[in-house]
Image (tube, rainbow, N blue to C red):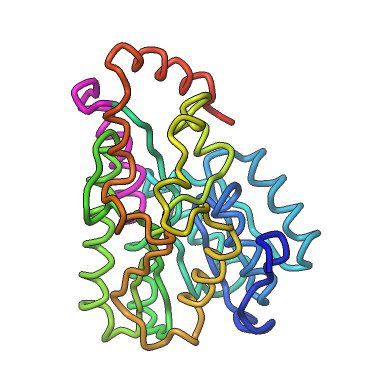
């Protein structure tokens, strides 16, 4: 079977009637997750900061799957936005069964070139965004004594190994990993499962062009770092996400599942290879990255 022929692994009604919220769900991997959840019978809320992108994605996803999609503009750094988004989900669907904390931000840079504000920007999106959403949904579930609820966090393999050149992201993702395991122990008694997925290279046009722009993508061929010799297919990640938020994984709690073709075992720290970049090249790289913002 080729990647283009790959079909989802779950039974067609695996998420029937469930309501799943996916932050950063309008593009890339978040959209792939949303699409598969819809195919499995879930109602889905997708969020991001860009209204035009969200509405377009929601329209297309509904046409492709026949499911119901609620697009909500939400900056996960802002607790008021998150609370409003949560209220919109309850108003539209009457319930909330699962939360996928997928919204993220990242950039490559030697750490000595970064300001304190650069760290704060990434930590606010990745860590505090996950915290804000988790607290909002979790408090509601606990107050209403709603059980069989699921939080799934999208982290990275360098959440536990660290990685040069993406240090703010590594710090933030490590925090999300700790959040995942801590709440698995604390909130399990409330019937709330907390798990995480750590993807390796799953290229998306927007995110990857900002991280590894232009000729950099060709020079630092990620497939050479993966023992399987290829990049991940979006459906493979969607399969894993759907399983972990479904009742079929009902006894999985506090787990972090790596899906990276063995990349981190071959060489920990996904971006450590950037030590090969000559110091004088970083100015040019930053200009290329700025030129891809908003794609």
Tell me the quarter of the image containing the N terminus: bottom right
214 shown above or below 106: above
Q: Position of residue 265 (x, y in %)?
A: 29, 59
Q: Nearer the viewer, residue 211 or 139?
A: 211
Whether residue 119 is in magenta: the answer is yes
Report the magenta stretch's main SS: helix
**Quarter of the image containing the C terminus?**
top right
Residue 28 location, x and y as percent? Answer: 58, 48
Q: Quadrant of residue 274?
A: top left
Query: Residue at point 28% right, 57% down?
Result: 176
Q: Nearer the viewer, residue 90 or 169?
A: 169
> In the drawing, does residue 57 fall left or right of residue 76?
right
Q: How many numbered tags mark residues here? A: 0
**Left or right: 211 as drawn, with respect to 172:** right
Side (left or right) of 131 relative to 224:
left
* Image location (x, y in percent) of residue 31: 60, 54
Residue range (magenta): 110-133
Query: Is residue 219 shown in magenta?
Result: no
Residue nearest the viewer, comparing 155 with 146: 155
Residue at 28 percent across and 38 percent down: it is: 272
50 relative position to 170: left or right: right
Residue sitting at 34 percent across and 17 percent down? 282
Quadrant location of residue 270? top left
Which residue is depicted at the point 30% across and 84% down? Answer: 190
Question: Where is residue 130, by image quadrant?
Answer: bottom left
Percent position of residue 181, x then y: 24, 70
């Amino acid at each position: 079977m080729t990647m283009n022929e790959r079909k989802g692994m779950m039974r067609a009604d695996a998420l029937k009637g469930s309501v799943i919220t996916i932050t950063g769900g309008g593009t890339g991997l978040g959209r792939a997750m949303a699409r598969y959840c819809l195919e499995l019978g879930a109602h889905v809320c997708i969020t991001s900061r860009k209204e035009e992108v969200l509405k377009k994605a929601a329209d297309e996803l509904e046409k492709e799957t026949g499911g119901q999609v609620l697009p909500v503009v939400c900056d996960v750094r802002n607790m008021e936005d998150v609370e409003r988004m949560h209220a919109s989900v309850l108003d539209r669907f009457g319930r909330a069964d699962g939360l996928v904390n997928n919204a993220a931000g990242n950039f490559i840079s030697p750490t000595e070139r970064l300001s304190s504000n650069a760290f704060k920007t990434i930590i606010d999106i990745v860590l505090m965004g996950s915290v804000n959403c988790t607290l909002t949904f979790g408090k509601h579930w606990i107050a209403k004594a709603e059980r069989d609820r699921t939080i799934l966090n999208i982290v990275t393999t360098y959440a536990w190994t660290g990685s040069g050149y993406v240090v703010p992201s590594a710090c933030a993702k490590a925090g999300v990993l700790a959040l995942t395991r801590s709440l698995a122990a604390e909130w399990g008694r409330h019937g709330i499962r907390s798990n995480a997925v750590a993807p390796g290279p799953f290229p998306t046009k927007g995110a990857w062009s900002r991280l590894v722009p232009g000729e950099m993508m060709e020079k630092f061929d990620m497939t050479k770092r993966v023992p399987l010799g290829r990049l991940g297919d979006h459906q493979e990640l969607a399969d894993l996400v759907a399983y972990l938020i479904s009742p079929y994984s009902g006894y999985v709690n506090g787990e972090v599942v790596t899906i990276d073709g063995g990349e981190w075992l071959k060489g920990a720290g996904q971006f450590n290879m950037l030590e090969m970049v000559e110091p004088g090249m970083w100015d040019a790289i930053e200009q290329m990255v700025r030129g891809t913002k908003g794609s």
